[in-house]
Image: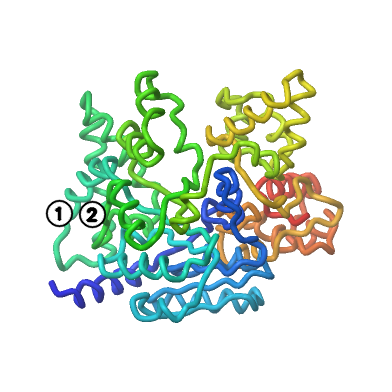
């Protein structure tokens, strides 16, 4: 197949089952800057930054960013006319004036986009042809501003060797002339059958079964554009780093700090990893954990060379509990991770609190200041605590006249997935709940919200209160 045919086929597949984007909170510039600060790197202020997402699809990731950071300049580019059309419609409906959306091939338009403080490439690097991948990294080397950061997600080896078993199996069983719907049906059936067969066995097959047992719960978009993608180039971490290096870039850290931890590994493995240099340690951890996906933070090589892990920087951050930890805690199944600190942050959830307040809380319980700071850093690298530069702009509790974020209300008018102020996707699948959410414009009390949502039951106010509590916990209400 010729190179042009490969590109045409990928573009057609991209629109056959249109890619449905979601906010990715790991890619938020505020988070990237907060993590960079832990490594002694002062990134540009996200609130006034120039932000680019390549392969932005329907712009579901960057439009909420633009709404949350009105003084920032936000740019998205994608080669799908269909998805760019959807993005422009949504941007216009939200009244966003700080967004520019460019339709075109990155190989042709990349140089014209300008320089950027933050570049996001989520679901892009591993899923495009080699020449597009090279054009992207070359553009990054030219157009990432000094001090800037790039977020790049990609599939990695050795973990993806496991996934390739399923990918190869379905590709062998899908006829060349199968329609997109038929391809999805075959994929779900194949994954279900493989999981069932392997789960009845011991050893490696039983482990493989877990990889495919969730296929029924994955959306058509996720299956079609990941497992069924015509290109899915998983690489070793060291190969990725070498590619960055050829264009004057370097690896700063992971957007999921918990994945950089050696917690849970046998003592001898931890000792070996500790003795290695930073990049070798990351590759070693991939082998130890059979990692198959990374979300890496990249910067210019000189910035990376100056970076040093600076734990005292944690005291200048905002902290919030990870959503999963709070959910586990609510049902009594929370992991034992830095207990008092997690309890303190969970009580404030979904809001963030200054690290200085968390440290003061810990010292009030008898810890020394250095010990409390060490506990905060450990919690960040355990993945139990999220770092932020600025306070999260949300209300942890609903006030007398609750106001839902305009992006959340706009999304609720169109479906059951809404963007939150924690830059995550929240499902509101109850029509009554969506009606109340849409009505939360800051002018209505509980009784008025019940009337607006046509709730006439005797317990209408209690139901509205329950919904507002859910909205607040999901980060949908503005401060």
Residue 173, numbered circle: 1
For the residues bearing labels 2 and 1, Cβ distance under 8 angstroms: yes
Residue at 47% across, 78% down: 113
Query: What is the spatial separation of the Cα atoms under label 2 and label 1, in whole angstroms?
Result: 8 Å
On the rendered image, what quadrant is the N terminus found in?
Answer: bottom left
Circle 1 packing at 10 Å, graded few (<14), some (14-19), many (20+), is few
The residue to which callout 2 is attached is: 186
| Residue 366 placement, left or right of 97 | right
Q: Quadrant of residue 5?
A: bottom left
Residue at 28% across, 46% down: 236
The image position of residue 430, as x and y in percent, is 61, 53
On the rendered image, what quadrant is the C terminus found in?
Answer: bottom right
Residue at 26% across, 41% down: 158
| Residue 264 placement, left or right of 329 | left
Which one is nearer the viewer's eye here, 435 or 287? 287
Looking at marks 2 and 1 on the same chain, the residue that comes earlier in the sequence is marked by: 1
Residue at 39% across, 68% down: 18
| Residue 181 placement, left or right of 281 | left
> Is the residue 461 above or below the residue 98 in the image?
above
- Is residue 224 something that shows in the picture? no
């Amino acid at each position: 197949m010729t190179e042009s045919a490969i590109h045409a086929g990928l573009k057609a597949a991209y629109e056959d089952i249109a890619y449905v984007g979601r906010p990715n909170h790991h890619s938020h510039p505020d988070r990237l800057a907060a993590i960079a600060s832990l490594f002694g790197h002062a990134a540009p202020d996200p609130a006034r930054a120039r932000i680019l997402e390549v392969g932005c699809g329907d712009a579901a990731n960057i439009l909420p960013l633009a709404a949350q950071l009105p003084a920032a300049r936000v740019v998205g580019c994608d080669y799908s006319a269909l998805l760019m059309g959807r993005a422009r419609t949504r941007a216009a409906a939200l009244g966003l004036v700080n967004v520019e959306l460019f339709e075109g091939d990155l190989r042709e338009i990349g140089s014209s986009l300008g320089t950027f403080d933050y570049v996001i490439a989520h679901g892009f690097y591993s899923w495009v042809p080699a020449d597009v991948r090279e054009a992207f990294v070359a553009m990054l080397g030219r157009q990432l501003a000094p001090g800037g950061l790039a977020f790049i997600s990609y599939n990695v080896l050795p973990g993806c060797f496991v996934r390739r078993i399923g990918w190869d199996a379905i590709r062998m069983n899908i006829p060349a002339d199968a329609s997109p719907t038929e391809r999805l049906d075959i994929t779900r059936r194949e994954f279900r059958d493989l999981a069932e067969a392997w789960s009845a066995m011991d050893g490696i097959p039983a482990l493989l079964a877990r990889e495919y047992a969730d296929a029924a719960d994955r959306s058509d978009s996720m299956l079609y554009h990941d497992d069924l993608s015509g290109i899915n180039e998983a690489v070793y971490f060291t190969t990725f780093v070498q590619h960055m290096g050829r264009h004057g870039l370097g690896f700063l850290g992971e957007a999921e700090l918990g994945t950089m931890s050696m917690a849970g590994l046998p003592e001898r493995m931890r000792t070996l990893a500790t003795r290695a240099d930073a990049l070798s340690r990351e590759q070693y951890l991939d082998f130890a954990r059979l990692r198959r996906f990374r979300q890496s933070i990249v910067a210019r090589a000189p910035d990376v060379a100056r970076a040093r892990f600076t734990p005292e920087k944690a005291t200048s951050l905002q902290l919030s509990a990870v959503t999963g930890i709070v959910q586990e805690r609510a049902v009594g199944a929370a992991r034992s991770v830095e207990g008092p600190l997690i309890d303190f942050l969970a009580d404030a959830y979904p809001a963030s609190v200054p690290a200085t307040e968390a440290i003061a809380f810990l010292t009030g319980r008898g810890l020394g200041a250095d010990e409390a700071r060490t506990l905060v850093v450990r919690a960040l690298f355990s993945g139990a605590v999220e770092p932020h530069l600025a306070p999260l702009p949300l209300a942890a509790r609903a006030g007398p006249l609750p106001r839902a974020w305009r992006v959340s209300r706009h999304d609720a008018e169109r479906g059951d997935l809404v963007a939150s102020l924690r830059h995550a996707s929240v499902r509101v699948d109850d029509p009554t709940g969506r009606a109340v959410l849409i009505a939360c414009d800051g002018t209505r009390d509980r009784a008025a919200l019940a009337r607006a949502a046509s709730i006439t039951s005797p317990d209408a106010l209690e139901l509205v209160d329950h919904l507002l509590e859910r909205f607040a916990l999901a980060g949908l209400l503005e401060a």
